[in-house]
Amino acid sequence: MKGLIQIAGIRNQAEALMLVDAGVHQLGFPLKLTHHKEDLSEEDAGQIIRLIRPPASAVLITYLNRAADILMLCNAVGVCTVQLHGDITLSELRKLKSLARKLTVIKSLIVKDHNLQELKASVLKFGPCVDAFITDTFDPASGACGATGKTHNWDISRTLVEHTAKPVILAGGLHPGNVRKAILYVKPAGVDAHTGVEGPDGGKDISLVKSFVGEAIWAFSQLTPSVPFPDRLY
């Protein structure tokens, strides 16, 4: 399989099942956030996650930064993959991996203006303790680190893909109209969309989702990925 396709911001069970039917590999459930309102309670998220069957899977997206809190939330909602957007220290990340060796950890790399060297340092620092990275966009207006609906400088993401042996997911303002170009240029191991596949009511739009998935599959088919995702990430 080439290219992980992730859609984040699940609002209800019907939406989750629609995404699975559309061919989405990984469904993202944001909880314990800093700048955004949660779509679901922990209890509701857990109920939906328990309905998801392979080959699809769920990922917890959180800004928690203490190993014990992260692991507690993972266990509460029933996920084996967590995407960390908070300002976690290396010691806490090491602690998380030691407490849950089978937990798949994706670490965010938040792209700002001219912060490539900082991100390259983060890749070297956190690389040994994570299974993958995800690049996303910083919004200076709100301070949000992701789920901004804005793209960033893809040159930075492309350089990070080339700079690490770990898989890199590309996020930030992706939608059906730009995901093909993004994949062909950045050459990521996966892509993530949130607001880019939503309708006016904020819910996932089936036509946009199917178009996004189709465009992503075609673009990934043109690549020869040097850093494929481990099977457990699908």
Image (cartoon, helix red, strand yellow):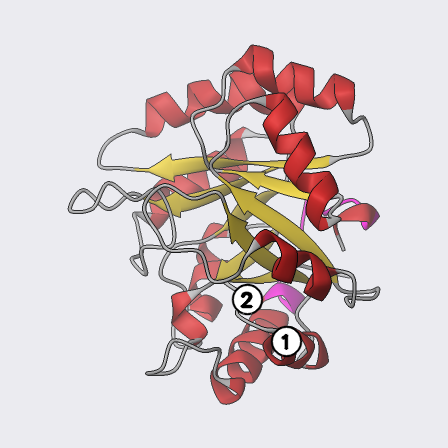
| Residue 192, position as x, y percentages in the image | 52, 58
Q: Give the range drawn in magenta.
A: 220-231
Earlier-in-chain disc, 1 versus 2: 2
Tag 1 near tag 2, CB within 8 Å: yes
As drawn, 107 above or below 158: above
| Quadrant of the drawing holding the N terminus | bottom right
Residue 99, can we see it? yes
Q: Residue at x 57, y 70 (%)?
A: 216
Which residue is the site of mark 1?
A: 19
**How many numbered discs sit on the rendered protein?**
2
Q: Residue at x 64, y 39 (%)?
A: 73
Q: Between residue 57 and residue 224, name the one nearer to us.
A: 57
The dominant secondary structure in magenta is loop
In screen coordinates, is 144 left or right of 187?
A: left
For residue 127, what is the image quadrant?
top right
Residue 10 - label = 2
Tag 1, which secondary structure?
Answer: helix
Q: Between residue 177 and residue 126, name the one nearer to us.
A: 126
